[in-house]
Amino acid sequence: MARVTGIGGVFFRSNDPAALAAWYHEHLGIDPVSETGAWTQAAGPTVFAPFSQGTDYFGDPAQQFMINFRVDDLKALTAQLEAAGITVETREEWDMPEIGTFARIHDPDGNPIELWQPADGI
């Protein structure tokens, strides 16, 4: 059976797409799409998980999606983000030894972003 092999892109609206793309590049290292290519991810698992309409996991009930980015060093990235004035939220209940550690930020448009450092072996 033919199947999807991964996420090819994440697309969403913004009042200032160029500024938002620059923010993602500056703070998270995600290369914007250009004539020379696009951001290339590291290989690894991707979770595809619809949530119920009533979930509070994303925060604001008006938010219809949340991006989860795999990161290589959550503590270092968290320190960089906080030094740049970006609020980072962590909760003990988000950390799962068998899956990894998590933190949450929001981009300038208010979109929730989950940062995930996978546990060893994932």
Image (cartoon, helix red, strand yellow):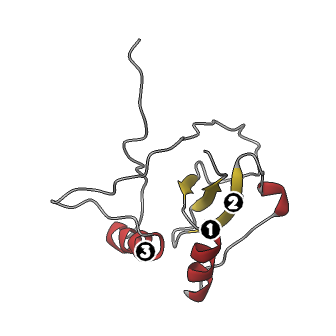
* Residue type indicated by callout 2: Phe
Displayed quadrant of residue 51: top right
- Say which of marks 3 and 2 sits in front: 2
Residue 60 visible in the picture = no
> Mark 2 Cα within 10 Å, few/some/many (few <14, many 20+)?
many
Q: Is residue 30 left or right of residue 36?
A: right
* Residue type indicated by callout 1: Leu
Q: Residue at 21% across / 61% down in the picture?
A: 34
* Residue type indicated by callout 3: Trp
Q: Residue at 39% across / 64% down in the picture?
A: 30
Instruction: Looking at the picture, tell me which residue is in the foreground, 104 or 72.
Output: 72
User: Which residue corresponds to mark 2?
Assistant: 102
Disc 3 or 2, which lies upstream in sequence?
A: 3
Work out how far the residue at label 1 is from the one at label 2, CA to CA, in angstroms: 8 Å
- Say which of marks 3 and 1 sits in front: 1
User: Which residue corresponds to mark 3?
Assistant: 23
Q: Residue at 43% across / 74% down in the picture?
A: 23
SS state under label 3: helix
User: Which residue corresponds to mark 1?
Assistant: 74
SS state under label 1: helix
Instruction: Looking at the picture, tell me which residue is in the foreground, 110 or 103.
Output: 103
Disc 1 or 2, which lies upstream in sequence?
A: 1
Labelled pair 3, 1 in contact (Cβ < 8 Å): no
Residue 31 visible in the picture = yes
- Mark sitting on residue 52: none
Labelled pair 1, 2 in contact (Cβ < 8 Å): yes
> Mark 3 Cα within 10 Å, few/some/many (few <14, many 20+)?
some
Which residue is situated farthest in the left direction here?
35
Work out how far the residue at label 3 is from the one at label 1, CA to CA, in angstroms: 18 Å
Q: Residue at 77% across / 56% down in the picture?
A: 95
SS state under label 2: strand
Q: Is residue 121 above or below residue 26?
A: above
